[in-house]
């Protein structure tokens, strides 16, 4: 399409400007790199460009005005405003979608033809209906021009989507395979067969691979009226609309396959202990880097997921599906970063996704819960978590949790002033089933635990910003809540401030609270309870018990009867602890007077990062040890408005890998880290006798689970300057692919994957 033709086809988009002037501006300032709009070796194609189409006019204008230094695009801030507007509208015209074009025809009739006589749905999905064999067409009207849609129907071979090239493969095992090459290289191939199954192949498994010319799809046979109706229907497909239900859902299996890691903690119970044992104390010294995958973000905090040989990993507002053996991309979903978010979501923090059935669930920075199809990466539905709420403080940073036929998602923003809540959504449609508020409104029950104006002015906080856990045996959901707001200053929130800093036991079917426990009543230290509430079935003091165990940011290790909520153990796991002498028989901390933050600053231990934090923990049922990274550090707490918690000069902190006795809380062994004690890396226990952990210096290491002796390490330099001073920001996991065990962790901007030779 020429520049003149692009303008001619969509006059409505540029009706208020002179086409001749727009062409002259483009030719003078842009054509040297972008040619007639289709791009050159010096600049990308701007016609029918998905990324350009996804941007609004303000974003396009800003890009033209300020340039893109990293891509070599200069700024055009010397152009007058009218010229910038003309160029913006012209680039918008290049990308006029079919959905923005008046298309005659009967959409309802076109939909019936698509799912009926036309046979389109035998290979394609639209709105969650059909089969995921060929590309998903749910957003085809938004992503394509009317001309490209017409061409695709008339001549499918000329418009094959990348990743859907047809190939024939002969396997060395003797079997033939025909399907789409979703990706391939000299060393591996990711083939989707014509039934929708992925075959993730190493080159050693392939005898021959031959591309087939043309397209699997034949030209559509339709009368002029049928073709017009079909085009009208396709042009109307703009993707899922927030709050609009989708269709069909393949129910997930009751338990993951051996070697899979389908949820944030591997299992919904929250225990990062794996039964995999190919990597052992004896051979871990041979562990080496198998592959890495970079993501364009300073620090990745996500835990990769693996199901059926495919790895799913998230970055800011994006999800990648990768071949878990090689790291090769199968699909990539991405949407623009939001402008309205604040705090951690605005930084691009995202800790992962959840896999259930045929779907991958993740949450965007502005707290939209999205369901993607596992095979295509296309969105099936989208729901706004803070639906009906105003304000910029709502966002999300963590992985949702798939429970039964629901997806549970929390909310972040507790450090900025908001009212916390937890929501459950139907996995098939995205319909919200229930919402549980974590703070009351003024005058409601529990508001008596908030004396002052904090509830009315700020909502109280108590965000649900980390992933909870689920006990299928008792059908109970456990979720930690964040700190009260304002933090460090309790003048306008007298009382315990429920349900801040608590663990909540919830009926997942109804959202009703079964029981709760508050770790730090009237928190003045920002010690939220986002730490993992781990579900265990084990012997406790001579009796088989259903337990809930957690190490809290306040420096105490807790064990509960998870059915009744009875506190069975509360012992400190750090030595530097000055705010309480212990946990009383009533379950409340025994406070030490005079430890509140002051205007001049008060030394308190632990420091604001806590004795531990949100990073993962593990329990090995054989050693009966609870493993965690613990922080020994004190800080100066300053009462707001001069909110400035700070370290203590000449009193450095230190991190330790520690093993605790589950029945007593006693420290069995510890291994000191080397570094500045600002690490947020978690641990992974395996049946091979190992504990993998992120060491404060930036090394990724494996220790003997019996005594903490370090048996293997590789320096990832994750402790290099990362912008906010913190080093490790992710926790390790392990999985099998093609029968081989791998260990993976996010370090800086990279996903690192290790295996034995």
Image (cartoon, helix red, strand yellow):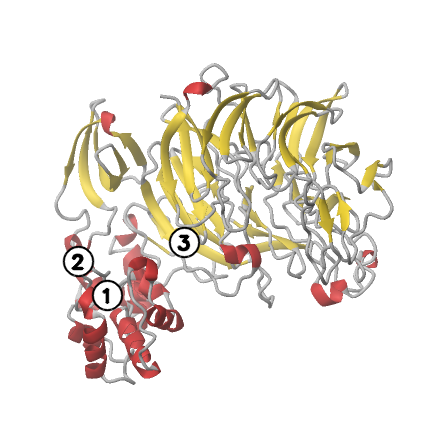
Report whether 304 appears left or right of 89: right
The secondary structure type at the circle numbered 3 is strand
Report whether 373 appears left or right of 267: left
Q: Where does the image place residue 64, in percent across and percent down from the top left?
A: 32, 70
The answer to whether any part of residue 177 appears in the image is yes
- Mark 3 or mark 1: whose residue is earlier in sequence: 1
The secondary structure type at the circle numbered 1 is loop
Quadrant including the N terminus: bottom left
Q: Where does the image place residue 630, in percent across and percent down from the top left?
A: 65, 34
The answer to the question of whether label 2 and label 3 lie on touching residues, with beta carbons closer than 8 A, is: no
Q: Where does the image place residue 727, in percent across and percent down from the top left?
A: 53, 42
Residue on which disc 2 sits? 221
In the rendered structure, find residue 47 and report the number of the disc placed on it. Answer: 1
Q: Residue furthest top?
A: 282
Residue on which disc 3 sits? 379
Establish if 631 lies above or below 385: above
Relative depth, front residue between 490 and 119: 490
Disc nearest the viewer among 3 and 1: 1
Marks 2/3: CA distance? 29 Å
């Amino acid at each position: 399409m020429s520049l003149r033709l692009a303008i001619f086809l969509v006059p409505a988009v540029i009706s208020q400007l002179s086409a001749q002037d727009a062409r002259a501006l483009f030719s003078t300032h842009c054509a040297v790199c972008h040619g007639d709009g289709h791009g050159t070796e010096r600049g990308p194609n701007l016609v029918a460009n998905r990324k350009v189409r996804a941007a609004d006019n303000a974003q396009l204008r800003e890009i033209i005005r300020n340039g893109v230094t990293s891509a070599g695009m200069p700024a055009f801030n010397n152009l007058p405003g009218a010229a910038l507007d003309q160029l913006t509208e012209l680039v918008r015209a290049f990308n006029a979608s079919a959905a923005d074009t008046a298309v005659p025809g009967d959409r309802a009739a076109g939909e019936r033809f698509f799912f009926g006589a036309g046979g389109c749905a035998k290979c394609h999905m639209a709105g969650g209906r059909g089969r995921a064999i060929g590309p998903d067409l749910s957003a085809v009207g938004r992503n394509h021009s009317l001309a490209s849609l017409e061409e695709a129907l008339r001549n499918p071979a000329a418009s094959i989507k990348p990743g859907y090239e047809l190939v024939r493969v002969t396997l060395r095992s003797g079997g033939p395979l025909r399907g789409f090459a979703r990706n391939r290289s000299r060393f591996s191939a990711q083939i989707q067969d014509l039934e929708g199954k992925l075959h993730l192949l190493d080159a050693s498994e392939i005898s021959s691979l031959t591309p087939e010319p043309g397209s699997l799809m034949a030209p559509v046979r339709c009368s002029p009226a049928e073709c017009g109706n079909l085009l009208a229907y396709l042009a109307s497909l703009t993707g899922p609309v927030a709050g609009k239900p989708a269709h069909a859902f393949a129910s997930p299996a009751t338990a993951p396959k051996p070697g899979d890691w389908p949820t944030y903690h591997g299992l919904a119970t929250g225990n990062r202990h794996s039964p995999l044992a190919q990597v052992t104390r004896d051979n871990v010294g041979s562990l080496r880097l198998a592959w890495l995958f970079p993501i364009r973000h300073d620090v990745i905090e996500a835990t990769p997921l693996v199901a059926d040989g495919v790895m799913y990993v998230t970055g800011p507002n994006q999800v990648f599906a990768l071949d878990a053996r090689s790291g090769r991309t199968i699909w990539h979903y991405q949407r623009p970063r939001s402008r309205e978010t604040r705090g951690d979501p605005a930084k691009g923090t995202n800790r992962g996704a959840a896999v259930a059935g045929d779907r991958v669930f993740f949450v965007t920075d502005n707290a939209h819960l999205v369901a993607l199809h596992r095979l295509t990466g296309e969105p099936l539905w989208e729901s706004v978590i803070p639906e009906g709420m105003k304000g910029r403080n709502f966002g999300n940073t963590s992985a949702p949790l798939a429970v039964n036929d629901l997806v549970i998602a929390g909310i972040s923003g507790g450090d900025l002033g908001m009212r916390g809540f937890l929501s459950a959504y139907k996995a098939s449609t995205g319909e919200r089933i229930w919402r549980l508020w974590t703070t009351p409104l003024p005058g409601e029950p529990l508001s008596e635990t908030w004396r002052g104006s904090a509830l009315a002015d700020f909502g109280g906080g108590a965000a649900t910003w980390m992933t909870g856990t689920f006990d299928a045996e008792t059908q109970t959901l456990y979720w930690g809540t964040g700190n009260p707001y304002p933090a460090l200053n309790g003048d306008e929130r007298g009382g315990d401030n429920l349900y801040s800093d608590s663990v909540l036991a919830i009926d997942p079917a109804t959202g009703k609270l079964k029981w709760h426990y508050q770790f730090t009543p009237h928190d003045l230290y920002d010690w939220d309870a986002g730490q993992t509430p781990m579900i265990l079935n084990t012997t406790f003091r001579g009796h088989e018990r259903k337990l809930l165990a957690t190490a809290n940011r306040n420096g105490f290790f807790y064990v509960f009867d998870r059915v009744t909520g009875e506190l069975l153990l509360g012992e400190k796991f750090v030595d530097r602890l000055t705010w309480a002498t212990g946990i009383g028989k009533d379950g409340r901390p025994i406070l030490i007077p005079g430890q509140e933050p002051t205007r001049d600053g008060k030394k308190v231990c632990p420091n604001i990062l806590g004795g531990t934090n949100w990073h993962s923990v593990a329990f090995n049922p054989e050693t009966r040890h609870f493993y965690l990274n613990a922080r020994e550090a004190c800080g100066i707490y300053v009462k707001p408005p001069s909110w400035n918690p700070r370290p203590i000069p000449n009193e450095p902190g230190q991190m330790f890998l520690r093993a605790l006795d589950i029945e007593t809380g006693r420290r069995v062994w510890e291994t000191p880290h080397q570094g500045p004690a600002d690490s947020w890396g978690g641990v992974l226990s395996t049946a091979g006798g190992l504990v993998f952990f992120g060491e404060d210096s930036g090394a990724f290491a494996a220790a003997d689970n019996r005594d903490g002796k370090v048996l293997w390490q590789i320096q990832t330099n994750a402790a290099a300057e990362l912008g906010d001073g913190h080093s490790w920001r992710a926790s390790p996991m392990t999985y099998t692919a093609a029968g081989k065990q791998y260990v993976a962790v996010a370090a800086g901007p990279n996903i690192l994957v290790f295996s034995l030779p």
